[in-house]
Amino acid sequence: MSLLAKFGFKKKETTADDSVTRGLLVFAHPTTVISVEEILRDEGYEIRVVSPPPAYRTGCDLSVEFPMEAEAAVVKLLNMVGLPPLDVVPITGQGMEPLQFVRTKMYGKYIMIRAANMKMTVDQETKTIVNISGGGCPDVPYLATAMIGKRLSEAPDPGEVGFSLCAYSLNTSREELIRAIGV
């Protein structure tokens, strides 16, 4: 008799639903995640940048969600380019799911998309940026000044004119807005 059976526990049978298909790459710095995202997308991996579960958060964090079947190849690639993850964590269920990095809110004719702590609000009819808020990075006021009052198609790309995690998050908001309402 096994020790578990002796205390009245049964071994859980593994089912197809128990298989882990996604994992998280955990890094020390959000800027590393931005570089890793570009590398993995260029290599054709289906990934997404997410907020890690609370147990893996150390501040202003991002993680990369990726297909677990690619773990060996992804970790090898990241080691080769000098961007090894601190940890690789399988998303196994309750409490391990990454948090929603992008959220959408409708305010009448306005749509606001939040990515991390950065928010961009656009008039859906004119596609004009009416507000930018959030974040605490030093380039946020510059980004807001450069973008508010411009149409999505005319506003500068925050990822190209900014240099911070806030600029990255704002660019994510902009990309989601373009997907949602076009330019």
Image (tube, rainbow, N blue to C red):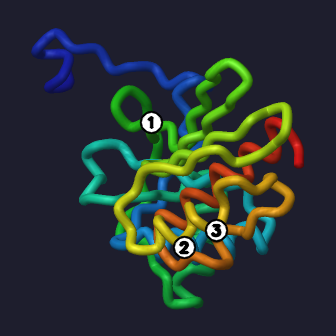
As measured in the structure, the alpha-carbon distance from the residue carrying label 2 to the one carrying label 3 is: 38 Å
- Where disc 2 sits, the SS reads helix
Query: What amino acid does circle 3 point to?
Result: Ala
Identify whether 106 is placed above or below 136: above
- Between 60 and 72, the one lying in front of the other is 60
Q: Residue at 43% of width from left, 68% of height from top?
A: 30
As measured in the structure, the alpha-carbon distance from the residue carrying label 2 to the one carrying label 1 is: 21 Å
Query: What amino acid does circle 2 point to?
Result: Val
Query: What amino acid does circle 1 point to?
Result: Glu
Q: Nearer the viewer, mark 3 or mark 1?
A: 3
Residue topped by disc 3:
146
Question: Looking at the rendering, in which quadrant would you find the N terminus?
Answer: top left
Residue topped by disc 2:
75
Q: Residue at 88% of width from left, 43% of height from top?
A: 182
Q: Residue at 18% of width from left, 22% of height from top?
A: 4
First in sequence, mark 2 or 3: give its number. Answer: 2
